[in-house]
Image (cartoon, helix red, strand yellow):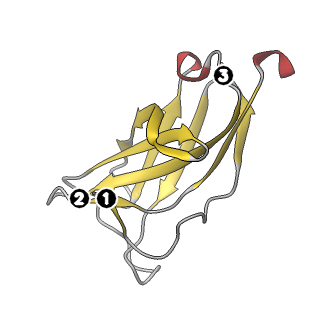
């Protein structure tokens, strides 16, 4: 069962974009003190998107790309096919697995997917 690294659940600003488009998320991770860089070397990262009110039902899972410099940054990209046909409000959780296989949910926020014809 994943745990929170520190008390920052629901701390992400809303992310909103048109379904069926490319969108990149960028993350910076810190130790519990909020200052010390969290070294992600040997770990992995992902973003899990679930229906609002149904966190156990994953709709989208993105694999994170760990950056080399600085050691605490990573990104995840929504490709058009990830969100085509979806619209509405979802819950989004960035997750980090450290080199010891401990999984942490560092934050949570809302993903708002606008209809594809909203452009």
Q: Earlier in the sequence, mark 2 or mark 3?
A: 3
Q: Decide which of 48, 57 is in the foreground and name it.
A: 57
| Residue that label 3 marks | 21
Q: Decide which of 75, 109 is in the foreground and name it.
A: 109
Q: Residues within 10 Å of mark 2 (few under 14, many from 20)?
A: some
| Residue 47 percent across, percent down from the top left | 45, 43
Q: Which residue is drawn at 42% across and 49% down?
A: 74
Give the foreground label among 2 and 1. Answer: 1
Q: Earlier in the sequence, mark 2 or mark 1?
A: 1
For the C terminus, the image quarter is top right
Residues marked 3 and 1 touching at CB (< 8 Å): no
| Residue that label 1 marks | 2
- Checking the image for residue 108, the label placed there is none
Label 2 – label 1 distance at C-alpha: 12 Å
For the N terminus, the image quarter is bottom left
| Residue that label 2 marks | 98
Q: Residue at x 65, y 18 (%)?
A: 20
Q: Which residue is drawn at 73% across and 40% down?
A: 16
Viewer can see residue 119: no
Residues marked 2 and 1 touching at CB (< 8 Å): no
| Residue 69 percent across, percent down from the top left | 37, 55
Q: Is mark 3 on a helix, strand or loop?
A: loop
Q: What element carries label 1?
A: loop
């Amino acid at each position: 069962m994943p745990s929170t690294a520190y008390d920052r659940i629901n701390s992400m600003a809303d992310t909103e974009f048109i379904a069926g488009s490319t969108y990149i998320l960028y993350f910076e991770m810190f130790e519990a003190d909020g200052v010390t860089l969290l070294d992600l070397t040997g770990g992995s990262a992902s973003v899990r998107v679930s229906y609002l009110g149904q966190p156990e039902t994953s709709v989208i899972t993105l694999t994170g790309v760990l950056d080399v410099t600085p050691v605490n940054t990573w990104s995840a990209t929504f490709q058009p096919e990830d969100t085509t046909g979806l619209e509405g409000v979802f819950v989004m959780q960035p997750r980090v697995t450290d080199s010891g296989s401990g999984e942490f949910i560092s934050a949570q926020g809302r993903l708002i997917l606008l209809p594809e014809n909203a452009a």
